Each structure stands twice: as C-alpha cells, then as structure tokens.
Image (cartoon, grey):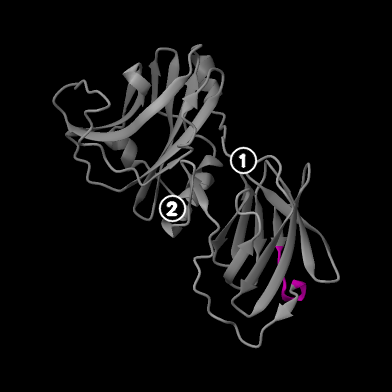
C-alpha cells in the first residue's frame, strides 16, 4: 500500500508536449524554431496576436493567449512546417518549425525587428485563431474547449496533491487535487493498475445523492449524472498494468448540500469492475484557486 501511494505522487502525462527556441533568422526573416516531443514552447509578442496559420495542424497544435502563442505536438516527431503570425500592431512574422532531439530554452521573446512585413494599419480578422484540440479523436475549435484543455494541461504540470484513495481489485484510484477557475471545478484523478488485466473504461460519471445509505447502481442507471464539461485524456480508455494514468474532469460549480454525497464513478466495459470514490463536502471547500 505504501509503495503504491508513493508511486502515485509521480505525475505521468499521456499526451506529449512541445517546446521551441530560436536558432537563426534567415535573410527572409523566417525565424527557425526547434521543437521536441517532451516540452512546450511559448512565443511572446509585444502586443496581442490577431491571427495565425500553421501548415501542419494535424501534428502541431498552436493556441493563442493574448500576446502569447503556445506550441506543442501530439507526437514524438513532426514534419517541418511553417507558422505565419499577424499581430495587433500590424506586423507579420514567419516561422519555420522543425523537430530536434532536445532544446533548452522554452521561451522566445519576439520583437518587431523579427518581422518580415509591416502594414500601414492593422486589419481586423474574423478568426478564432485556433488550430484545434483533439477530444475523443475529433479536433475541436471551440474556444471554450481549448481554454479548458489549456487549464487541464496547466494542472497536469503541477505537483500532485494525493488525498482520497480507493483500492478496488488491484486497481488504485486517487484524487490528485481539486482546483477551481472562473466557475469551473477541475478534478485530477490518478489511476494505477496492479492487476494483469487492463481496465477498459466504459463510463465515468459524477453523481450527487441524498445521504440514505449506500446505493448500488449499474452504469446504465445514471439519470442523475452531472454534466462533465471536458475530460482530459478521455481518449485513453485502456488502463494497463504498470502504468499510472492521469485524468482531469471539468465541471461547472454546483450547489452541494452538506447532507448530500458526491461520488466519482468509474465503470468498466460489460460492468465487469466498477469503483465509487466519495468526494466529501470539505474536500470541495479546499479546492485550490488557479
């Protein structure tokens, strides 16, 4: 038990991330950026970004956050690509992005002298500025989904605060932290499988019930399940032996009466195995502000 809980303090992130750095500027003002699979890159501009376009949206994901672009990759190797950026002050920038084994600098400060063109006046663009975030195999361009994904990645990079733990048939489920941001609660769950059989996730739900003793329920009997706004790492359905898997679930803040019970439930396919983790009222009161 102590060995299992000690291991759970490690945070294992299933998706891979990318970082980059400037290596040189060509005569055409293309800024060369090196990216690697285990880090993330921040391009920081003098003013807000109006619009950007990436030639490899299937492998390199770019997110806009005011005057910053966050770049990362889903894979451990990507094709060379070009990234075009237009900023609020009328400057245009061109970047060449390519994969290398390792980089050291995670941030690149962009200055106007790195641009290749300056418009007389900034033009307004009707664009969400988002390449996309993959959710269950589908690329989403919804700005709300992208923001939830960005927050979940931030949480995944934080030190785990393991509290509530549930053991079930050689499976360990632990709450690695509860966080709150702008009316949304984020629940980080860390799962370890010590059995020889993989745990195939079929359903994850949050259920609030009146305290009338323990109630047995099957996966199909979930009419009172609360809406999950976003599930981080939801594409990973099979929890195999030896690995530690991190999931983060985002829910809108809700009314939670002291006399009620809140449960997080995991159900396996064919209802072979299931687990319920009680989330006490006091645990939600201690949610960390992001």
User: What secondary structure is found at the residue carrying circle 2?
Assistant: helix
Q: Which residues are magenta?
A: 109-114
The residue to which callout 1 is attached is 16
Residue 39 position by quadrant? top right
Q: Identify which residue is drawn at 37% across, 28% down.
A: 202
The residue to which callout 2 is attached is 145
Taking 201 as reference, is 69 above or below it?
below
Q: Position of residue 285 (x, y in %)?
A: 32, 42
Residue farthest along the bottom direction in this orientation: 120
Q: Is residue 19 visible?
A: yes
Residue farthest along the left direction in this orientation: 212
Mark 1 or 2, nearer chain start: 1
User: What secondary structure is found at the residue carrying circle 1?
Assistant: loop
Taking 287 as reference, is 4 above or below it?
above
Left or right side of 58 for 97? right
Q: Is residue 113 magenta?
A: yes
Left or right side of 121 for 1? left
Residue 286 position by quadrant? top left
Q: CA distance from mark 1 to mark 2?
A: 18 Å
Circle 1 packing at 10 Å, graded few (<14), some (14-19), many (20+), is: some
Circle 2 packing at 10 Å, graded few (<14), some (14-19), many (20+), is: some
Q: Position of residue 4 (x, y in %)?
A: 51, 18
Q: Position of residue 72 (x, y in %)?
A: 63, 49
Residue farthest along the right direction in this orientation: 27
Q: Position of residue 121 (x, y in %)?
A: 61, 86
Taking 6 as reference, is 285 above or below it?
below
Q: Identify which residue is drawn at 40% across, 12% down.
A: 169
Q: Identify which residue is drawn at 56% across, 32% down.
A: 11
Taking 69 as reference, is 113 above or below it?
below
């Amino acid at each position: 038990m102590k060995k299992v809980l000690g291991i759970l303090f490690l945070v294992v992130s299933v998706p891979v991330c990318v970082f980059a750095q400037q290596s040189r500027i060509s005569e055409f003002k293309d800024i060369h950026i090196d990216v690697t699979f285990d880090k993330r890159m921040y391009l920081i501009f003098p003013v807000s970004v109006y619009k950007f376009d990436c030639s490899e949206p299937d492998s390199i994901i770019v997110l806009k956050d005011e005057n910053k672009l966050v770049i990362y990759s889903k894979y451990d190797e990507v094709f060379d690509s070009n990234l075009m950026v237009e900023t609020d002050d009328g400057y245009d920038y061109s970047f060449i992005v390519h994969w290398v084994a390792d980089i050291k600098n995670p941030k690149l400060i962009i200055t106007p002298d790195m641009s290749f063109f300056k418009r007389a006046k900034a033009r307004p663009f009707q664009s969400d500025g988002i390449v996309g975030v993959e959710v269950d195999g589908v690329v989403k361009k919804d700005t709300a989904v992208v923001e939830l994904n960005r927050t979940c990645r931030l949480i995944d990079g934080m030190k785990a605060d393991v509290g509530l733990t549930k053991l079930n048939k050689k499976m360990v489920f632990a709450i690695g932290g509860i966080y709150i941001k702008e009316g949304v609660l984020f629940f980080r769950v860390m799962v370890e499988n010590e059995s020889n059989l993989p745990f195939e996730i079929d359903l994850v739900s949050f259920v609030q019930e009146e305290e009338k003793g323990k109630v047995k329920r099957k996966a199909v009997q979930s009419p009172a399940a609360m809406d999950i706004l976003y599930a981080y790492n939801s594409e990973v359905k099979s929890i195999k032996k030896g690995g530690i898997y991190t999931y983060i679930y985002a829910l809108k803040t809700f009314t939670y009466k002291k006399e009620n019970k809140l449960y997080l439930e995991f159900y396996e396919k064919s209802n072979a195995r299931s687990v319920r983790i009680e989330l006490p009222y006091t645990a939600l009161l201690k949610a960390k502000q992001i």
